[in-house]
Structure formats: structure tokens, C-alpha cells
């Protein structure tokens, strides 16, 4: 038999076809079988021990940052482009204002500690920057003010103090030598204790998550032992996940979702799958808020400053007023499409129905992009100007602040220059609502809500408030 020889052009064509088909055939089966959520977790960088790399004497936080930038030249610039640094969103066109407005902790009001402006010596102990005593414009412009240690140092050897600077007595060399990829402890130092203490603000983020069991959070507990950055994917210091309370609209590409890892996963029970278009994963898998540590649910500033009352973290503090806490309770359920319908801006008028909403999650039963979602509702009594009819932000900390004088008039007068809001000299207290989306303390499937949890005789859903004429299981409404 003669040897078969193919023309050279045929061999070339076969080669091209193979170059095209081989990668397709290689990757296609992997894509089809990649249904384990763990396969989608980001690869963690190999940690480089810095204990023998970092040298020198450091007397200020800026000294440490300069040393970091010798190797990580672009790190500060990348951090400075994030909302972790600016504490402020881009400007939005909002329907109730003629001019665009930005929203963020740097310039907005809430119904916890009320606001940061004028209170930088206390509030900025959670900011990833130094030097707030210089004023915002100067502080924000200096790359050396970026605090690398806040996110990367061992929290056992590093902590922050007044104006965002290192706390007194910190061994900065030891802190710098301890740096590594961020841990739950790094993130938790600010996010678990936001609003003035453990569990105060969120209800699904508190110090119980430092070392959780699997029954507390199926992702962070037990064998999974996931870090915050496993879900909050990070590139060039841009961290996925934007806070509803500090924004108006949020680009879905900037948000964290269960579907990042749980790709096209269906439940074995088809009845559950029929709910996926209208019920968020969190609604069933986070059946309760504040499972171990209590969270603050009301805050009454009108009671602050009283003499003769005993301070107690969970009921009353002279500097802050009266509180109530709760734990292991059902969330509030609202339609939610990922953004705000409304976010109170400094100078906005009070609500006409006696309740002023700091934020209103966007979405309703007619919105195809909205799903029923769990929230923590925080209700406050906070100060407002009775003549100008808007909420007031006081200066609370520092010389002349309310915590120094216990005089509201002085606190509001000091704040005028900081906030740009005039104070008429007349104040009162009004009711405000603020919603916090619940996305942590996720439970395993066997602990998720069951049919009767929502559709039973004593179901937790307020169907009429959600826009239904009644329980949709009885009349076949939107599932």
C-alpha cells in the first residue's frame, strides 16, 4: 500500500481546525459540569511574610504608608478611587431635587450616630485613612494618608484612634510586619461595630462572626470558613458590594449576589423553583436577624443628656439616649430591586405622614426586577429644625459638641458651617425609619423557611403590604 500524502494546504487547514476545536472541546465540558459553588470562589494570593521585609522606625501612620508604596507603587491611588476612601458616591440626578447630589457617610445623615461632619475625631476611627484633623480636602488629597494597616495588619497589634490615626501606643513596626490579605477580623473591626458598637447597625453583621459555627453562617462557619473577600470579590482594591443606606442607585455589576457562585442551581423541589423570580435567596435562607448578639432596633435621641440615670449599653447612655435591642427575630420584608426609591439628603423636608424615611428600598409587585427581600428596620427619634422643617445634624464629639456640653443648641450651631444647613434656634425630635438589607448569617437548606412559614395560618408575610390581595397561594398570584 502506498503511503497516503495529503496536500500541504490540507494539512494547514486541519491544523487551523484543531486550533479552534481543541480549546472549545476542552472548556465546554468544564463549563457544563462546573456546578459546585466552590469552583467559583476567587483564588487567594499567596501570602508573603513581611516580618523580614519591612525595616525602619515608624513614628506615624504616614511613615508606614511611604514604606508600603516603595513596593506597592499604585496601591494608594487605587484605594483613593474607592468608596472605602471617599465615603461618597458619584453624583446622581434625583427626582426630588433640581441639582445632582452625592450620597455617603462623608456628607449625609443617618438615624444612628446621625452624621460624620464635625465628628471626624470619632467617626474616622473606622475610615481607611489618617489625618482627618487636617480637614477633608487636605486629608483626601494626600496618598500618604491611606491607611494600609486598617485592612492588612493583624488586628491584635493594630488599632485606630482619633481622626483615623493609629491608636496611642501602637507598635507601628510590629503592625507593618504583620500585614497579610484581609481577614474577617480586619473587615469586622469596622463593619461588625458600625453605628457605635457590636451589632448596633446591621443585625446580620456582629462580632459573633469572627469565629462562627456553621449554624450561625453556613459560609463563614464550619469547614467552609469563608472570608469576606470570597463573596466581596476585589480587584485593584475595588470591593464588590455597595451599601444601600449610603447610595441612591447601585450598579448591579458593583453588587454581591448569591448567583456569583450558585450559578444556574435549581432546587430539587420544583415548587421552590417557581419562587425564584420573585423571592430573594436571602428571604428563605436568612429566617432571623441577630441570631446570637442583639442588634439595636430603636434609638431615641430626645432622652439624651439626662442627669441621674445609670448608663447601660443596651438601654440608656447619657451621650446617646434610650435604646431597645432585639435578637433572633424575623426581618421586615419589602420588594427590592437593588437600589433606593428615595434617600434623604441634607435639607430635604420631613415626611408628611409623621415618618421621615432615611431610605426607601426601591421595588414593588409590578417591578419585574424586584424580589421580596429581608431587611432590618431601625426606628429613631432624632432632632429636626422646627422652623426649617428638616433634620439636623449636631456636632456630638469634641470641644463644644453635645457629648461635651449636653447642650443641643450649641451642637447645632457648631454644625452649621460643617453641613451648610442653617439652624433657626428651634428644634424638636421626629420619627425616622432606616432599612438595612439582610445578607449575612445564611442558614443551610434544612434551616431555611418552609412553606408554612409564609403561607401558613400564622405566616410571617404581610401580603397586603406587599401588594397582594391576600396569600397568593390561595389565588395563584405572582409566585
Image (tube, rainbow, N blue to C red):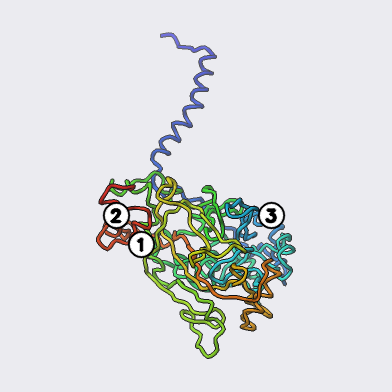
Within 10 angstroms of label 3, few (less than 14), some, or many (20 or more) residues?
Answer: some
Whether pointer 1 and pointer 3 mark residues with C-beta atoms closer than 8 Å, the reply is: no
Q: Position of residue 55 (x, y in %)?
A: 70, 66
Circle 1 sits in a helix, a strand or a loop, which is it? loop
Whether pointer 1 and pointer 2 mark residues with C-beta atoms closer than 8 Å, the reply is: no
- Residue closest to the eye, 469 or 122: 469
Snapshot quadrant of residue 148: bottom right
- Residue bearing the label numbered 1: 287
Q: Earlier in the sequence, mark 1 or mark 3?
A: 3
- Residue bearing the label numbered 3: 77
Q: Position of residue 478 (x, y in %)?
A: 34, 47
- Residue closest to the eye, 37 or 316: 316
- Left or right of 55? Residue 453 is left
Which is closer to the viewer, label 1 or label 2?
2
Q: Is residue 165 visible?
A: no
Circle 3 sits in a helix, a strand or a loop, which is it? helix
Relative vertical location of residue 2 with respect to residue 59 in this rendering, above or below:
above
Q: Position of residue 84 (x, y in %)?
A: 61, 59
Which residue is at 31% across, 60% downward?
447
Give the Cα distance between marks 1 and 3.
Answer: 41 Å
Q: Which mark is residue 425?
A: none
- Residue bearing the label numbered 2: 471
Amino acid at each position: 500500500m502506498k503511503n497516503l500524502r495529503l496536500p500541504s494546504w490540507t494539512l494547514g487547514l486541519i491544523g487551523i481546525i484543531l486550533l479552534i476545536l481543541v480549546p472549545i472541546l476542552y472548556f465546554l465540558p468544564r463549563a457544563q459540569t462546573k456546578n459546585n459553588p466552590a469552583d467559583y470562589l476567587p483564588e487567594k494570593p499567596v501570602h508573603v511574610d513581611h516580618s523580614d521585609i519591612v525595616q525602619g522606625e515608624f513614628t506615624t501612620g504616614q511613615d508606614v504608608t511611604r514604606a508600603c508604596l516603595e513596593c506597592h507603587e499604585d496601591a494608594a491611588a487605587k484605594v483613593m478611587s474607592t468608596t472605602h476612601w471617599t465615603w461618597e458616591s458619584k453624583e446622581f440626578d434625583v427626582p426630588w431635587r433640581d441639582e445632582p447630589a452625592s450620597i455617603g457617610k462623608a456628607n449625609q445623615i443617618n438615624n444612628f450616630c446621625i452624621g460624620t461632619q464635625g465628628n471626624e475625631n470619632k467617626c474616622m476611627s473606622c475610615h481607611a485613612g489618617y489625618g482627618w484633623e487636617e480637614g477633608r480636602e487636605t486629608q483626601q488629597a494626600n496618598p500618604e494618608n491611606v491607611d494600609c494597616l486598617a485592612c492588612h495588619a493583624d488586628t491584635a497589634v493594630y488599632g485606630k484612634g482619633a481622626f483615623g490615626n493609629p491608636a496611642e501606643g501602637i507598635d507601628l513596626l510590629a503592625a507593618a510586619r504583620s500585614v497579610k490579605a484581609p481577614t474577617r477580623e480586619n473587615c469586622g473591626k469596622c463593619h461588625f461595630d458600625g453605628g457605635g458598637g457590636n451589632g448596633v447597625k446591621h443585625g446580620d453583621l456582629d462580632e459573633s462572626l469572627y469565629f462562627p459555627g456553621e449554624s450561625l453562617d453556613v459560609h463563614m462557619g464550619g469547614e467552609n470558613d469563608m472570608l469576606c473577600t470570597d463573596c466581596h470579590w476585589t480587584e485593584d482594591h475595588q470591593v464588590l458590594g455597595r451599601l444601600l443606606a449610603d447610595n441612591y442607585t447601585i450598579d448591579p455589576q458593583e453588587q454581591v449576589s448569591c448567583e456569583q457562585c450558585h450559578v444556574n442551581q435549581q432546587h430539587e423541589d420544583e415548587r421552590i423553583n417557581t419562587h425564584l423570580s420573585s423571592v430573594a435567596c436571602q428571604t428563605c435562607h436568612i429566617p432571623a436577624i441577630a441570631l446570637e448578639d442583639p442588634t439595636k432596633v430603636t434609638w431615641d435621641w430626645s432622652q439624651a443628656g439626662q442627669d441621674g440615670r445609670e448608663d447601660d449599653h443596651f438601654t440608656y447612655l447619657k451621650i446617646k439616649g434610650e435604646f431597645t435591642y432585639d435578637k433572633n427575630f424575623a426581618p421586615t420584608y419589602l420588594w427590592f430591586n437593588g437600589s433606593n426609591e428615595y434617600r434623604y439628603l441634607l435639607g430635604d423636608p420631613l415626611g408628611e405622614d409623621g415618618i421621615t424615611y432615611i431610605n426607601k428600598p426601591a421595588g414593588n409587585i409590578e417591578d419585574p426586577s424586584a424580589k421580596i427581600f429581608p431587611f432590618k428596620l431601625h426606628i429613631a427619634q432624632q432632632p429636626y429644625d422646627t422652623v426649617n422643617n428638616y433634620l439636623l445634624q449636631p456636632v456630638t464629639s469634641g470641644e463644644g459638641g453635645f457629648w461635651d456640653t449636653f447642650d443641643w443648641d450649641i451642637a447645632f450651631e457648631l454644625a452649621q458651617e460643617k453641613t451648610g444647613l442653617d439652624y433657626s434656634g428651634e428644634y424638636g425630635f421626629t420619627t425616622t425609619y432606616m432599612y438595612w438589607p439582610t445578607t449575612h448569617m445564611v442558614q443551610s437548606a434544612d434551616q431555611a423557611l418552609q412553606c408554612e412559614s409564609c403561607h401558613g395560618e400564622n405566616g410571617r408575610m404581610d401580603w397586603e403590604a406587599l401588594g397582594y390581595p391576600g396569600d397568593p397561594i390561595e389565588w395563584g398570584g405572582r409566585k
